[in-house]
């Protein structure tokens, strides 16, 4: 009995680490590593609670089915037990809150000296990426989604807003999103840790072409980034409305 | 109640269209504008025209019976609230027939999307007016419930002998009184913005779109508990009867209802973690705390079944299904209450899965449990236990097939409210599984409809007390006569009918 329960929980652990917690993307920024940790802690805690409570619900269904017309003992309360099962969940959520709070502080931390800044403006139904201090201004359309280019291992500040309705800037590969709201400037830092192209999309329903309001993020090395900046600068005049690069 | 079931069928049909559209990437069964109308109406109808009104309708029937009263305190007001709700629903759906179609900005209709510059159609106005009518209906009903419970109890029915369902409705009514005015206010402000030149939510004119979110969710989160507390009550009535024991931890259940109601007034901004303008830590902490009284309820239900003598009727199966599904909804709820998780899960299919586990796996299963439990009392006819079990298993399997996979889709990056999606690895298959699940659920609902039709046509009368019930409604005839009771048993505990029939077991007398 005991060993079968052990192997069950070991199996669950394997299952979660095997398919990477709910098929969660690996997380391609420094911030995403912290977010991912939160997912793992909460998923394991959730599985633990699920196994215990499912067990508690299913045991009576198997053990105490109706077998005769006799009424079972008519007890109504057990104050000590009730206080215990109030306090235990309380302790669990306090621990979870401590973890969550610490992680959120890290993710929301704004570096005093980011290496670069991008002004992101959401509109119906695409995105504008403006690199301040340069003339680079990438404007997409639903049919030609724009691409954001970020250097690896450097902190880029994103300043996000909307020019019309509410949108949300979501990069599932970074495990992160933030709302774009007219009249609000939302700032956050991204520090990519893996080279690659990541899909991004609008997460807040924003009207007709919400489903097509996507973009991509290309994470490149510093050398490639400099090369890209030079190329964009020289071609800016011809492609201010250029869409994808 | 019957009207809310009618709206449930309408909203369920809309859900089937949604699942058909999303069954494969790139399907074009409906266009983007139609799709937006469909999910807006689906959400609005399920929440405002089904889950809440069903609870209010059930309570309208049960509260007077369970407290031993002849009727509600204000019967005319009661009729008025029904018609407000009925025509409110008609008004919302009538948007389908006007230029530009029905409202298409989602069930929470965020401004500025719902402002006149962008949502130009009259459908949005009809939505505002219809919702205002249902929210006023809700407020007046809550007044009626509270008055009835406090003033119309039979002799001997002290507050601490009230059935748990009545307690949960008191907590729900208080929440309605605190939350619905905020909804009425935000709807009125939106209407003023749209037609009288107000700029409450327009940033360029000095307004603030975030204000809309605050006002809406100040109503919208208590609303979630308005949709679940009555069903905690339903479950707390069904489980003891079919465990053939009294409810375990009565006081804890009552206190936890008020703890949940109180805490739920302080969690609204957990819908706004990603806006970047609220204190996430505070709202996360209060949201986590709600898990504690909810956990207490689960343990009390387990305590009620513990060492009992469990009878597997259809109503009991739905109560068990409720617990299993709602547990998943609760666990994913604690997850999304953690801002770092919410940064990925918000507005994704993970969230869609979470709230369907709460409202579909939770409230909907309790509604079916309530129907199978109280149908004989309301209509004097028995539903078929055989068909009922088919209905339960089809719904249970279909529900979990549909919504379990959505958690994975959300984590992988599928946003909600998209009419189509790209053919990314795994997405097509997972969506297809979800759509197949919705067909299984539809089959379950068909079995249910067949059950209702055959039961209604049958000549067989239901006995007054088919289940060995505890509370006063099982004392009177099925259906109850005008003014409910001819006589009442002595009331010395929270289960007077049981005490009267089994005096040898009625030892302990709380309250």
Image (tube, coloured by chain):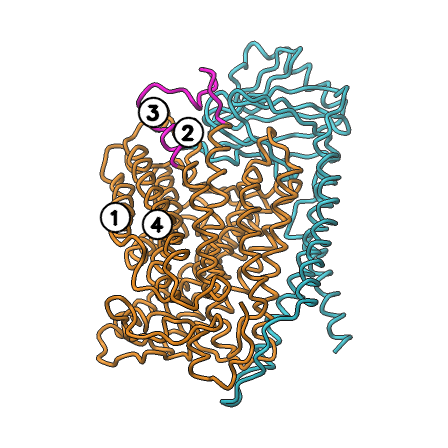
Chain colours: A cyan, B orange
- How crowded pointer 1 is (Cα within 10 Å; few <14, some 14-19, many 20+) is rated as some
- Position of residue B140 relative to residue B196, above or below, is below
Q: Residue at x 78, y 75 (%)?
A: A3
Q: Which residues are magenta?
A: B184-209
Q: Quadrant of the N terminus of chain B?
A: bottom left
Report the chain holding disc 4.
B
Q: Position of residue B150 (x, y in %)?
A: 41, 56
Q: Distance from label 2 to label 1 (Cα)?
A: 33 Å
Residue A30 shown left or right of residue B123 in the figure: right
* Disc 2 + disc 1, Cβ < 8 Å: no
Q: Distance from label 3 to label 2 (Cα)?
A: 11 Å
Residue A151 shown left or right of residue B233 in the figure: right
User: Looking at the picture, do discs 4 and 1 lie on one chain?
Assistant: yes
- How crowded pointer 4 is (Cα within 10 Å; few <14, some 14-19, many 20+) is rated as many
Q: Earlier in the sequence, mark 3 or mark 1?
A: 1
* Circle 2 or circle 4, nearest the eye: 4
- Position of residue B236 relative to residue A21, above or below, is below
Q: Earlier in the sequence, mark 2 or mark 4?
A: 2
Q: Distance from label 3 to label 1 (Cα)?
A: 29 Å
Residue at numbered disc 2 = B113
User: Looking at the picture, do discs 3 and 2 lie on one chain?
Assistant: yes
User: Looking at the picture, do discs 3 and 1 lie on one chain?
Assistant: yes
């Amino acid at each position: 009995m005991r060993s079968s329960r052990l192997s069950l929980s070991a199996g669950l652990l394997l299952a979660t680490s095997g398919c990477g917690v709910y098929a969660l993307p690996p997380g391609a920024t420094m911030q995403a590593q912290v977010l991912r940790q939160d997912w793992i802690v909460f998923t394991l805690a959730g599985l633990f609670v699920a196994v215990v409570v499912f067990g508690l619900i299913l045991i009576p269904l198997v053990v105490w089915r109706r077998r005769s017309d006799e009424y079972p003992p008519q007890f109504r309360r057990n104050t000590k037990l009730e206080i215990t099962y109030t306090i235990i969940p309380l302790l669990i959520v306090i621990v979870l809150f401590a973890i969550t709070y610490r992680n959120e502080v890290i993710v929301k931390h704004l570096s005093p000296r980011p290496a670069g800044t991008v002004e992101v403006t959401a509109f119906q139904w695409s995105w504008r990426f403006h690199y301040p201090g340069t003339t680079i201004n990438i404007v997409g359309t639903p049919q030609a989604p724009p691409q954001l280019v970020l250097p690896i291992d450097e902190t880029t500040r994103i300043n996000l807003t909307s020019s019309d309705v509410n949108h949300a800037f979501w990069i599932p590969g970074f495990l992160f999103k933030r709302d774009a709201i007219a009249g609000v400037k939302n700032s956050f830092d991204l520090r990519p840790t893996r080279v690659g192209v990541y899909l991004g999309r609008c997460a807040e329903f924003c009207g007709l072409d919400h489903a097509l309001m996507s973009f991509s993020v290309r994470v490149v090395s510093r050398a490639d980034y400099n090369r890209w900046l030079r190329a964009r600068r020289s071609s800016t005049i011809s492609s201010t409305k250029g869409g994808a690069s | 109640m019957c009207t809310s079931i009618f709206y449930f069928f309408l909203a369920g049909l809309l859900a089937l269209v949604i699942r058909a559209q999303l069954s494969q990437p790139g399907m074009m069964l409906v266009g983007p504008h139609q799709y937006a109308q469909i999910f807006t109406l689906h959400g609005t109808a399920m929440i405002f025209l089904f889950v809440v009104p069903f609870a209010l309708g059930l309570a309208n029937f049960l509260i007077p019976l369970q407290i031993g009263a002849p009727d509600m305190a204000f019967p005319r007001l009661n009729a008025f609230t029904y018609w407000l709700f009925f025509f409110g629903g008609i008004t919302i759906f009538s948007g389908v027939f006007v230029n530009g179609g029905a409202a298409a900005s989602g069930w929470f209709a965020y401004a500025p999307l719902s402002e006149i510059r962008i949502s130009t159609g009259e459908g949005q106005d009809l939505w505002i007016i219809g919702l205002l009518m249902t929210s006023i209906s809700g407020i007046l009903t809550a007044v009626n419930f509270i008055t009835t419970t406090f003033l119309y109890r039979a002799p001997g029915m002290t507050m601490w002998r009230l059935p748990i369902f009545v307690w949960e409705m008191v907590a729900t009514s208080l929440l309605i009184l605190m939350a619905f005015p905020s909804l009425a206010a935000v709807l009125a402000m939106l209407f003023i913005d749209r037609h009288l030149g107000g700029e409450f939510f327009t940033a360029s004119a000095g307004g603030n779109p975030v204000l809309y979110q605050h006002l809406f969710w100040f109503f919208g989160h208590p609303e979630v508990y308005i949709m679940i507390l009555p069903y905690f009550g339903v479950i707390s009535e069904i489980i003891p009867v079919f465990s053939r024991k009294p409810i375990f931890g009565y006081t804890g259940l009552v206190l936890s209802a008020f703890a949940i109601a109180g805490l739920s007034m302080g969690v609204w901004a957990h819908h706004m973690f990603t806006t970047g303008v609220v204190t996430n830590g505070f709202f996360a902490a209060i949201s986590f705390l709600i898990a504690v009284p909810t956990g207490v309820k689960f343990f009390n239900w387990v305590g009620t079944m513990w060492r009992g003598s469990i009878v597997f009727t259809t109503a009991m199966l739905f109560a068990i299904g409720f617990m299993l599904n709602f547990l998943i909804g609760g666990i994913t709820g604690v997850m999304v209450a953690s801002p770092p998780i919410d940064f990925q899960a918000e507005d994704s299919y993970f969230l869609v899965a979470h709230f369907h586990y709460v409202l579909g796996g939770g409230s909907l299963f309790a509604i079916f449990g309530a129907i199978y439990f109280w149908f004989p009392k309301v209509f004097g006819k028995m539903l078929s236990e055989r068909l009922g079990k088919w209905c339960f298993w089809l719904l249970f399997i279909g529900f979990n097939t549909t919504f379990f996979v959505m958690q994975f889709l959300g984590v992988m990056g599928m946003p909600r409210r998209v009419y189509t999606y790209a053919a990314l690895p795994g997405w097509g298959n997972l969506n297809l599984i979800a759509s197949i699940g919705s067909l299984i659920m539809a089959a379950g609902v068909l079995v249910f409809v067949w059950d209702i039709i055959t039961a209604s046509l049958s000549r067989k009368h239901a006995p007054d007390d088919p289940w060995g019930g505890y509370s006063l409604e099982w004392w009177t005839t099925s259906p109850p006569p005008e003014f409910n009771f001819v006589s009442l048993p002595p009331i010395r505990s929270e289960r007077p009918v049981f005490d009267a029939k089994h005096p040898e077991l009625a030892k302990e007398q709380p309250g």
